[in-house]
Amino acid sequence: MTADDAADVAIKPPLLFLGALALGCLMSLIVPLGPRLASPNGNALAVGFTFIAFGFVLAGMSARALRRAGTEIVPGRPASALVTTGPYRITRNPIYIGLTLVYFGLSIVMTSLWVLLLLIPTLMILQHGIVMPEEAYLKRRFGAPYRKYQAHVPRWL
């Protein structure tokens, strides 16, 4: 496999989000900000779990669309099909939106201001280290059909 066979991503997205979550929890214990870690009230639990559930549903539907098309779900592996159906009709990155919703929901459930604050650099790394290399790869791999898709479907929402 050559460099042109797949996107050269900086990190796998689940590891990015899990790393930020772990660092946020550690920071919450070392340098507490706001309420005590994992001390949500009933409303926070309801809101947090709603975000988590919606994020998992969106990511799951998106992964299923990729599997149905017979293409890779793992960034950094070759794509065999351009998927523009299901959630991909609305956004070019529904799995990443789903992961972001799960992470945001967890920050609420965990009552961690650190986890929430770390979402900002996490999204910056996601954008520059994963999404942009993926888009460059997909332009090389699929050419005009991908550029047409880009022109009609937003990167995010």
Image: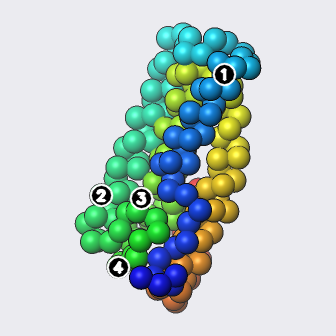
Is tag 2's residue or tag 1's residue first in the polypeptide sequence? 1
> Badge 2 is on which residue?
64
- Where residue 77 sits in the image (x, y, percent)? 41, 71
Q: Nearer the viewer, residue 66 or 89?
A: 66
- Residue flagged by tag 2: what amino acid is it? Arg
Is tag 2's residue or tag 4's residue first in the polypeptide sequence? 2
- Residue flagged by tag 3: what amino acid is it? Pro
Q: Secondary structure at mark 1?
A: helix
In which quarter of the view is residue 81 placed?
Answer: bottom left
For the N terminus, give its image quadrant: bottom left
> Badge 3 is on which residue?
87
Residue drawn at x 50%, y 48% is: 15
Is tag 3's residue or tag 2's residue first in the polypeptide sequence? 2
Give the CA separation, mark 2 to mark 4.
15 Å
Residue drawn at x 59%, y 71% is: 133
> Badge 1 is on which residue?
28
Q: Is residue 92 visible?
A: yes
Crowd band around label 3 with a 10 angstrom C-alpha radius: few (<14), some (14–19), many (20+): some
- Residue flagged by tag 4: what amino acid is it? Ser
Give the CA separation, mark 3 to mark 4.
18 Å
Is 122 placed left or right of 2 in the picture? right
The nearer-to-camera label among 3 and 4 is 4
The nearer-to-camera label among 1 and 3 is 1
> Badge 4 is on which residue?
80
Is tag 3's residue or tag 4's residue first in the polypeptide sequence? 4
Q: Are marks 2 and 4 in contact (CB under 8 Å)?
A: no
- Residue flagged by tag 1: what amino acid is it? Ser
Residue drawn at x 59%, y 78% is: 136
Residue drawn at x 60%, y 39% is: 20
Q: Is residue 150 visible?
A: no
Is 117 placed left or right of 7 in the picture? right
Q: Are marks 2 and 1 in contact (CB under 8 Å)?
A: no
